[in-house]
Amino acid sequence: MDIRYPETLRYAAGELTRIAGIVSLCTALSVTLNVDPTLAKDPDDLYDIRIEHGVGTITGSNPRSVLMGVYAYFHAAGCRYLKPGPAGEYLPPCDLASFDCVLRKAAAYAFRGQCIEGAVSFENVRDMIDWLPKIGMNLFMLEQVVPFNYMSRWYKHEASTVKQDEHPTYEQIEGYTRMLEREIKLRGLQLHALGHGYLFEPYGVHYKTWADKYTLSDEAIADAAMVDGKRGLYHGSPNFTQLCTSRPEVRAKMVRFLADYLERLPYIDFLHVWLSDAAGNCCECDECRKHHPCDLYVTLLNELDAELTARGISTRVVFIMYTDTLWAPEYARFEHPERFVFTTALARDHGKSYDDTPYDGAIPVWKRNDNHIKASFPLMMKFYEAWRKVFSGPAFAFEYPFYTDHFNDPGCMEVARVVWEDARSIRAFGFDGIMSDQTQRACFPNGLAQAIYAATLFDPSTDFDAFVDDYLTAAYGDDARRVRTYLETLTALFDPKTLRARLTETEQDTTGSAADVKTWRNNPEAAARFAEVSGVVDAFREVLARHTDECNPARRDMWRLLELHADYCVKLAQMLGYGARGDIDRARARFNEMMDWLSHVEDALQPEFDLVLFHKEFRRKLQ
């Protein structure tokens, strides 16, 4: 596959023609699309629109910026991109022949996008990739060599009480992966790849899911980390198993695999080279014990850089601060830091934005396979500061607001405000953007939270209330204000803070002081709030009834989702209400009933709602 600039520009020209043909009787636009690399250096994005009476230019700093400029032109003309997929395009009529647009905007952050997660189909991921440049995002990551773990969950229909396992194969998902890579590159987006799950690829072991069974060769067993005196798979999974990286020959096998991988897929822009997705599994052999795992990690990265340089491969390499690599290396340093980009999986409460309170204390001492740290955001920033003394190059945050946390806020209004604040403030912590590790099925009841996240990462001056009102007006028309009040009421009644709280009811702040946090279980105040949900929904049903015959297809679909969402909220509140009154057995029974209902209506909300992750989140809450 070789997607070059002209093809992305041809795609942009096709989108210009397509949307113009829908919104205007006058489709005879005379618009020139140009790339001017002097406007900004990649990966920054800048577009310049100068169109009067349908004639003019859209220029960008790179091909995807030109495509973003096309979508921005129609946004200025009244179009909105409400959620992924064709049904998410609100394209009202506009006389483009008399519409003038002079607009120049540059993205504030270099890294803005998503990583695959959840239980997602090929179409879910494809439609998300299509949506990203419409809302100003510039990257997508396909984790693992083949993201079987995520896509197979959909095709297996895990958690569904209705659908049968389609028995997806590794080769099938691999084929989808190649097609998705083409969709990413067609739009000129940054393609990020790999991450977890690849460590035993040099030995012919393809990681699929944690539940699959794996057999290691004698060679692979000999090279695996020694834990508790044994070498082999840690917890039965190659995704959880480290390698014995103190041995140069083991690192050489990994370096050779990664370099060969990039030679096969030269269109990858950023290769994420992470260690295993587990803790307590560092190699305990005599030689590995002489080194901190981060020193061996940086040594591996330097050796990879040397091999890529020798082969003439310019792909950037992303390393991560995560589990045992929270601690900066003691002696190893990057020989060519310009090759690398830094990311970190942040530990934080998604109910509030980043806490700038300094951590009051020293970084905990690292202990091999004996670390039990619940890292707050201030502590994470303490680790980050130590790393920045070693590496001062570009860095972005790896975040999780739409993994499962959004299920704690059925109104999604707190989520929207928190991610808006995150996008405005992330620069202050030394990051040049955010990658959201999330399901691509997170637009229930709408895509407002994701849209404002993207808009604010592009432009941190985005006004919260103005954006929300504009989005909701495009989605719901004259009743937008009532919809906003309704969703804000639902957020308040479900009270995401109590839903997030674990069975433990004490949390510590940065000074070590403890405060009680009430969970939703055995909580009379929460029970009273949950009891109000049904009445609020019933009162709103007369608004829903007025919009069953919307003419605009995008609005019709948004109202349809809101109607399904009303039933969902009533059932969710009833389930939670039993637990809040102390009857957890009845709550579990209602959860099973709700899963069956969701399974039966899943086809009606499949692109917007991830049943597998919903099941994961609430099964945990009901344990």
Image (tube, rainbow, N blue to C red):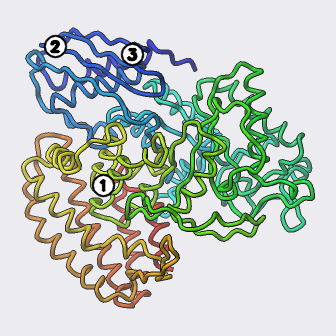
Question: The residue under label 2 is which amino acid type?
Answer: Gly
Disc 1 marks a residue whose amino acid type is Ala
Residue that carries the numbered disc 2 in the rendered image: 54
> Mark 3 = which residue?
9
Q: Kindly identify the residue that appears in the image at 50 percent across and 82 percent down.
A: 504
- At x 50%, y 47%, the residue is 397
Measuring 23% from the left and 68% from the top, which residue is drawn there? 490
SS at mark 1 in the image: helix
Q: Is residue 526 left or right of residue 552?
A: right
* Residue position for label 1: 416
Q: Position of residue 552 (x, y in %)?
A: 14, 40
Compare marks 2 and 1 and give the one earlier in the sequence: 2
Looking at the rendered structure, the kind of residue marked 3 is Leu
Say which of marks 1 and 3 sits in front. 1
Discs 2/1, front: 1
Residue under the image location 54 percent in, 41 percent down: 395
